Image (cartoon, grey):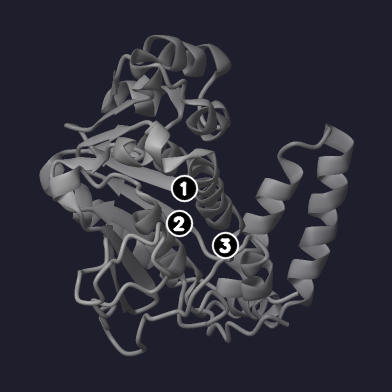
Amino acid sequence: MAAVAVLRAFGARGPMCLPRGPWAQLSARFCSRDPAGAGRQESEPRPTSARQLDGIRNIVLSNPKKRNALSLAMLKSLQSDILHDADSNDLKVIIISAEGPVFSSGHDLKELTEEQGRDYHAEVFQTCSKVMMLIRNHPVPVIAMVNGLATAAGCQLVASCDIAVASDKSSFATPGVNIGLFCSTPGVALARAVPRKVALEMLFTGEPISAQQALLHGLLSKVVPEAELQEETMRIARKIASLSRPVVSLGKATFYKQLPQDLGTAYYLTSQAMVDNLALRDGQEGITAFLQKRKPIWSHEPA
């Protein structure tokens, strides 16, 4: 099944609006339907922006005045940016970053009041869960580039990404318990990124951890000085973008598929994946190039 069909099974709505072309920026028009029927104006800027060049798509949370809160509009805009052209060989890796001193403060609490109602609340959390699963199931690696505070669903977003690079000034928390709303959905991603007792201390106390602590416990891949954050993140992205997309895609899918399995099943699944990898044109090209002592020329063909 094509990757985009699999991703759309998670319920994406609305047209894709990322234009083709180098560093093409998303139009200001919001792609999805008005999430709450609140009369959103077409001229109002989208809460995310996206640019793509040389196989690297940069998605930016672009609402710093609201601390990049993951409102329903923000979530749907992010979903649209992630889904767009997921099957295209032009796309090799995605970076998610944010404007301002806060990566994301989590859900917009104004959307979680009693006045909004239970059905709206359910849509918010269901949409957020879909976005997190889209990241996991996307055919290309997704990198979080964090420069600041990431709390609640913002921390969940970082934990859901395949790779996370942060500046040394960043911090992470799941503070919902302090306002009477336990971070149950952020806990899903957090518990899969850090040891159980670390996750539970964060969830029970709401206290933040530093970037260095997050690195120690596995929430982050790397911590660098703020001045080096973009350079290091782009270095990783460019390396991934230089490789065979179908090989990386197969590897990502297989990694997550085997992860919850028992040892025997995991080896069975990965052995089959290795055989499938060898059947790829780029699998054979890489081996041939190695034996011939030359650089491989990737076709990026899925078979």
Would residue 241 be found to the left or right of residue 140 on screen?
Answer: left
The residue nearer to you, when weighing 211 against 127, is: 127
Q: Mark 2 points at which residue?
A: 142
Local crowd size for mark 3, using a 10 Å CA cut-off: few (<14), some (14–19), many (≥20): many
Q: Is mark 2 on a helix, strand or loop?
A: strand
Q: Does the residue at mark 1 contact the one at mark 2 (Cβ under 8 Å)?
A: yes
Q: Name the residue under label 1.
A: 161
Count of numbered marks: 3
How far apart marks 1 and 2 lie (CA) works out to 5 Å
In the image as oriented, which residue stretches furthest toward the front? 115
Q: Which residue lies at the image location 53% right of the left edge and 82% below the top edge? A: 88
Q: Name the residue under label 3.
A: 138
Q: Does the residue at mark 3 contact the one at mark 2 (Cβ under 8 Å)?
A: yes
Local crowd size for mark 2, using a 10 Å CA cut-off: few (<14), some (14–19), many (≥20): many
How far apart marks 1 and 3 lie (CA) works out to 10 Å
Q: Residue 149, which numbered label?
A: none
Query: Residue 281: x, y in percent?
Result: 70, 83
Would residue 113 be found to the left or right of residue 182 on screen?
Answer: left
Please tell me which of labels 1 and 3 falls first in the chain. Answer: 3
Question: What type is the residue that disc 3 sits on?
Answer: His
